[in-house]
Image: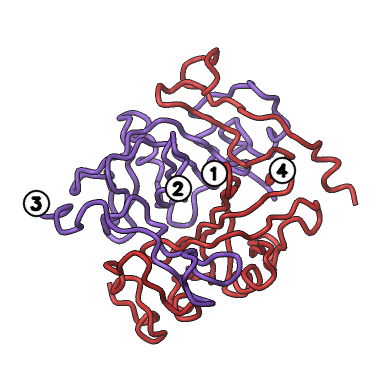
Chain colours: A purple, B red
Amino acid sequence: MTDTTSQLSGFSFKENENATQGQTFDTQNVFDALKYNEQGLIPAIAQQYDTKEVLMMAWMNAESLQETVKEGRVCYFSRSRQNLWRKGESSGQVQIFKELRMDCDGDTLLLLVDQTGPACHTGRRNCFYLALDQNGEGASSGASKSAITVTDAPIIDPKELYKK
Amino acid sequence: MTDTTSQLSGFSFKENENATQGQTFDTQNVFDALKYNEQGLIPAIAQQYDTKEVLMMAWMNAESLQETVKEGRVCYFSRSRQNLWRKGESSGQVQIFKELRMDCDGDTLLLLVDQTGPACHTGRRNCFYLALDQNGEGASSGASKSAITVTDAPIIDPKELYKK
């Protein structure tokens, strides 16, 4: 796979796969080598930094990534609204930015964050509340075979989240 | 946002946002309502089920999801090879499937897995070994300002992983 973006920017994910632990690279060069999709977006996973709970997955463009790092508050790109989405701007449930991780081929971001209240617009702490376990049964022990179980209740009534 | 797929399948993510904890739904109906992109793919985050480490992000199509649940071993869809990618088929580093989580709007999967050895093709335990912390400094304390730091070394030499 040719990697022209990376060659221009001075950093290549592919060419630095064997970099040693502790080795450092210029941030802007690495950012310039990130692989955005045809819409200019890259998937960003948000993980609560201390409990390691995966909270949600959303999308960023180059501008929202720069703003996140600069402001210390997570900003995504809303695909439905087609503009910057400062997490918590309407609900008040912000994500404080703690650390950014990029994956081996530069096409996925992992954000370590400190989430205020619920990350999910349904009022639940995280968005992944629909579960199927490895036996094809719901995660809740009493569930019938081949059922998806709702694992979490809202921690805030969603009506309260967006009432302003 | 209209949601015709969901209406046809008998399950709607949107309409069931207020489902109560413990409520169950038919697995196939929920699977049929998942939102795949134009290429028929959905992002799947793999998280080590006990340590909660985020290992990698890859893509699934409907067939790879069905196979994962049926076989109890994670199968993705390889975008570069355009076919099913049974994780570990060439490296031996498989992902045992533990639990599937779907997000609130049905467009992202979270897989809880038990990863044998490294998840990353570079031989590292996970793919997210390039880090920037919240102060614009590398995660390693000695790093210079605005640097990306390599946080992990391979646990297996990548040459050993793919030598067959």
Front: mark 2 or 1? 1
Q: Nearer the viewer, residue B82 or B69?
A: B69
Q: Is residue A90 left or right of residue A45?
A: left
Q: B67 above or below A65?
A: below
Are labels 1 and 4 assigned to the same chain? yes
Q: Calculate the distance from the C-alpha at mark 2 to the C-alpha at mark 1.
A: 8 Å
Label 4 near label 1: C-beta < 8 Å? no
Label 1 near label 2: C-beta < 8 Å? yes
Q: Is residue B103 left or right of residue A2?
A: left
Query: What kind of element bears circle 1?
Result: loop
Q: Residue B45 at what x, y percent from top left? A: 54, 53
Q: Amino acid at mark 3?
A: Lys
The chain that hosts pointer 4 is B
Q: Amino acid at mark 1?
A: Lys
Residue that mark 4 sits on? B118
Label 2 near label 3: C-beta < 8 Å? no
Q: B20 above or below B88?
A: below
Q: Residue A47 at what x, y percent from top left? A: 44, 42
Q: Calculate the distance from the C-alpha at mark 3 to the C-alpha at mark 4.
A: 47 Å
Q: Calculate the distance from the C-alpha at mark 1 to the C-alpha at mark 4.
A: 15 Å
Return the mark for residue A164.
Answer: 3
Quadrant of the image occupied by residue B143: top right
Q: Residue A98 at what x, y percent from top left? A: 40, 30
Return the mark for residue B52.
Answer: 1
**Residue placed furthest toward the bottom:** B8
Q: Amino acid at mark 4?
A: Pro
> What residue is shown at x 73% (from left), y 55% (from top)?
B94
Are labels 2 and 4 assigned to the same chain? no
Return the mark for residue A54.
Answer: 2
Label 4 near label 2: C-beta < 8 Å? no
Query: What kind of element bears circle 2?
Result: strand
Considering only order in the chain, which callout, 2 or 3, is on the residue closer to the N terminus? 2
